[in-house]
Amino acid sequence: MTNSDLDVIVVGSGLGGLTAAAYLATNGRRTLVLEQHYVAGGNSHVFRRKALHGEQSFEFDVGVHYIGDCGPNGMIPTILRGVGLEGKIEFLEMDPDGFDTLMFPDFSFRVPKGWDRYRERLTAAFPDEETGLHRCLDVLQQKAPDFAQWAMRPLSELFDECRLGQKVRAVLVGESGAYAVPPSRAPVILQAGFIDHYLKGAYYPRGGGQVLPAHLVDVIRSNGGEVRMRAKTERILVKDGHACGVRLTTGEEFRAPVVISNADLKRTVLELVSAEHFSPETVARVNEYRMALPIFCVYLGLDIDLRDRLPNSNVWYYDSYDIEGMYRDCDEGRIPADLGLFITLASVKDPDTEAIAAKGYTSMEVMMWVPPDHRLWAVEDGPAAGERYHGKPEYRSFKDQVMETLVDGVERAIPGIKEHIIWKEAATPITQEKYTLSTAGTSYGIEMATDQVGPMRPSPKTEIEGLYLAGASTMFGHGIVGSMRGGVGCASAVLDRDLMSDVESGQVFGDPSKLEGGGPGWDPWEASR
């Protein structure tokens, strides 16, 4: 593909950018995706490590841990079907009797599939709060006639109105780490949409998280597009108020009448394009946006096989019922005094893919939300500004300290784990900033708070002609579903056509027979490079 052939350039290969590119390529647009990393996927990519002197390997997910609503007519299968990927990805359902297990100091709760079972289990666990629970769940299930009045109000106000105690509040928001907003700022509509999404069933893609970007890359390449790695964008070019291309850090330039940024919102506006090309109002609004809290991740390889020992369920482990207090600690720049951990095991969710972990071994990921402040992590300007931080003793010492704190928490949640660890590493918000250039090291974009949700978030089309946005900070929200749905929305804005409506009515773009991905011996990680 030569420079003069391009119709669309996409900056960043997260799921939002890849989905937009796939829909545009299958609609005849000559599309180039540029990615600074060596593998496509953004937060959906995986990485591999070898332990025991190279005798055993593990694969770890960066961001694909579970997805809701992946039945035949679910949102993700529908989006994939629209670009010819129907049947290409198999979604393995997690335990419908408890896809999430919430563990508190003296109480555990398993979150089941289906609103009715969820309601029954909650009221059985908290019989003294049944009246308030029914009132709260009616609103969250959007069965209450006054849902519209509650939708944009904080979740904590709904809990107050329903006179719910601290324990039941903690259970209701026990999975809030998936959006990292405290109940005092989380809009009711966010929690309602989140829990409804997963109560339709929780799933994990067979083959690991990399299969999603790998198949989208296949769609793009099979339809005449290109996905180029190690290609870092320095500037999005604007001439006479119109986006016209990009310049890489190497000095190479590409020209196209449409540029889609799947990069961090603030860096897109303030650095890649620069503030001079936007209205003062837009620049002020972008500067004022709060980023969602970042996540500290620990990746563990175990020499024990937990496939048949544990249920196919994620674990949310808490030292306390005061979940609001954990967020408060982060907002005030402290690692939470009480742990709130998300523990997930890809080799349990997908027991037959030995690239994740061979039989006899386990791949485990552990996460906790933390403060973003550079100074807390002993960093000054951060890797996005070119700072070399990894060898700094203060950074490494604090990183190791937090990692061991999380490992101790895992040991309390699943006793006996520590003695089986043969691989251990951690990723901080600074790591996230290095690989994705995200502001404050977040993987969730701007916070989905009451003052930053829905129409208060950017739409795909910007005030600069030819410049569009995809990714976690748009009006479609973060996560796998938000990003991919936003990718379709972005492509729709470019083509001035409601692609989601077309796909929901059964239309398929592109020729599925051209696709090469999948099948025996196909490696999604290699296919994403």
Image: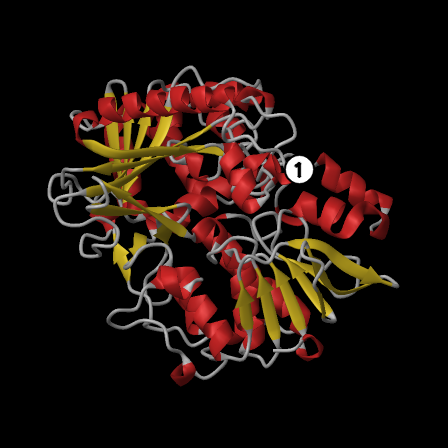
In percent of width and height, residue 518 lies at 32, 71
Q: Residue furthest right?
A: 240
Which residue of the protein is positioned furthest toward the top in this rendering? 337
Q: Going by the image, does 528 lie left or right of 276?
A: left
Using the rendered image of the protein, determine whether residue 75 is visible from the camera's viewpoint.
no
Q: Residue at position x 26%, y 57% from top? A: 92
> What percent of the width, then of the height, locates residue 250?
67, 57
Horizontal side, residue 203 vs residue 247: left or right = left
Task: Provide residue 66's location: percent of width, then percent of height.
Answer: 35, 49
Of residues 78 and 301, the one drawn nearer to the viewer in this rendering: 301
Q: Nearer the viewer, residue 125 or 266?
A: 266
Q: Residue furthest front?
A: 53
Q: Regarding mark 1 in the picture, which secondary structure is present there?
A: helix
Q: Position of residue 395 (x, y in %)?
A: 50, 23
Left or right of 502: which side holds 74? left
Question: Considering the image in quadrants, where does the C terminus appear?
Answer: bottom left
171 lies left or right of 478: left
Marks counted in the figure total: 1
Check disc 1 and give the amino acid type.
Ala
Instruction: Give the image quarter of residue 290.
Output: top right
Residues 74 and 307: in front is: 307
Color encoding of the figure: secondary structure
Neighbor class of circle 1 (other Cα within 10 Å; few <14, some 14-19, many 20+) is: few
Position of residue 362 relative to residue 67, above or below, is: above
User: Which residue bears the numbered disc 1?
Assistant: 385
Q: Is residue 518 above or below residue 278?
A: below
Q: Is residue 188 visible?
A: yes
Write down the quadrant of residue 112 in the picture. top left
- Quarter of the image with the N terminus in it: bottom right
